[in-house]
Amino acid sequence: MDPADARATLQAERARGLEAVAAASTLDELERVRVAVLGRKAPWSEVQRSLGAFEPDPRRELGRLANEVKSTLEGALRERRAELEGSAEDALLEGDRVDVTLPGRRPRPGSLHPLTIVRSQIVDVFTRMGYRVAEGPEIEDDWHNFEALNIPPDHPARTMKDSLYIDVPGLLLRTETSAVQIRAMESQDPPVYVVVPGRVYRREAVDATHGSLFQQVEGLAVDEGISFSDLKGTLEAFARAMFGPERRVRLNPDYFPFVEPGVQVAVSCFLCDGVGCRVCGNGWIELLGAGMVHPRVLENCGCDAERYTGFAFGLGIERVAMVRYGVNDLRLFYEGDVRFLEQFEGAA
Ligand SMILES: [Zn+2]
């Protein structure tokens, strides 16, 4: 290499290096540029290595030029590195950016289940009349669920509803909250005024109006001188408190083993006021079973049936909720679908 070629190479390398540095768009690219223009195999290094072969004058001149090119390129590399590092940091910060003015994620408040709303309303009506809330076990024995309620083993009422038995002989899932009537009378002497909300179980095919699990509210009043008109007056007060002051009740004879006489209770429709509509059909909505407590049931609980009389009633909470909220399928209450449940936010 003669001095003229060496000079030309250094000048060309300065121009090529500055261009390459400016074109590098990442730190990795910039590092490759550094190796290409100042690395051991770069043309600039070849010139540097060949300086010793030149005469002193051109050696000094070329040595100066080589240093100048090197520091120019190093300066450009340093500046470009700083730029690229800055923008890499900016990109990182941009990705992490938090807009503190955005509204936060609030937890969605839940609401009471429609059956819970209806159950507490029913219970409230009776506790305001002086009834006490009683509860009992969901796994019952034969005595409380059947026998004490005047349903002996061979009684046809045991086939009226199929029961769900458990593995322990003599125990079953209660089929009525009526079992708690017996427990209430066993545990206290009259007067007894209790209202019993709770789950009951039947072996039923599940459809829009039947489930194998549902909820009842049972009521029991036992005292001296309780008559059928007390029952009717109590049910009227209940119907008016739940469905409006204009409601009337209609009693039709019915049979339940633990009452005598027994009645099916219908309430005049709160939508059409008894005229007849899509919900009620004929103007009446059948809601309860009721009757005067059978003297044998009182005696079974050690209660003097000569001295005391009483009435009992039971109603399905799902039935009341379906009528009140216009729900046409019982299963909706148990599926836990938020789209259904959220419609009852703030419901009364
Ligand atoms: Zn109606």
Image (cartoon, rainbow, N blue to C red):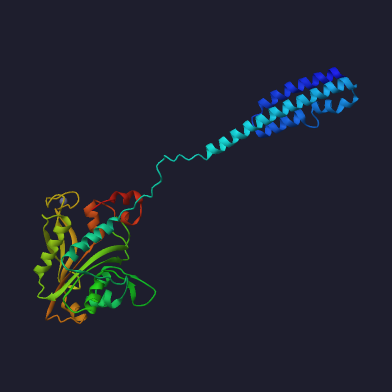
Where does the N terminus fall, quadrant-wise?
Answer: top right
Q: In terms of image quadrants, where is residue 143?
A: bottom left
Q: Residue 285 in the image: x percent, y percent? A: 17, 56
Residue depicted at 80% across the width and 23% down the height: 64
Q: Is residue 209 visible?
A: no
Q: Is 294 situated above or below 101?
A: below
Q: Residue 118 in the image: x percent, y percent? A: 24, 58
Q: Residue 298 in the image: x percent, y percent? A: 18, 78
Q: Is residue 119 left or right of residue 38?
A: left
Q: Is residue 32 left or right of residue 43?
A: left
Q: Is 194 situated above or below 250?
A: below
Residue depicted at 21% across the width and 53% down the height: 324
Q: Residue 219 in the image: x percent, y percent? A: 20, 68
Residue depicted at 32% across the width and 59% down the height: 206
Q: Nearer the viewer, residue 130 or 154?
A: 130
Q: Is 296 situated above or below 332?
A: below
Q: In terms of image quadrants, where is residue 69?
A: top right
Q: Nearer the viewer, residue 334 or 155?
A: 334
Q: Is residue 161 visible?
A: yes
Q: In terms of image quadrants, where is residue 122?
A: bottom left
Residue depicted at 64% across the width and 29% down the height: 25
Residue farthest toward the top in the current orientation of the protein: 4
Q: Nearer the viewer, residue 166 or 104?
A: 104
Q: Is residue 212 left or right of residue 245?
A: right
The number of numbered discs placed on residues in the rendered structure image is 0
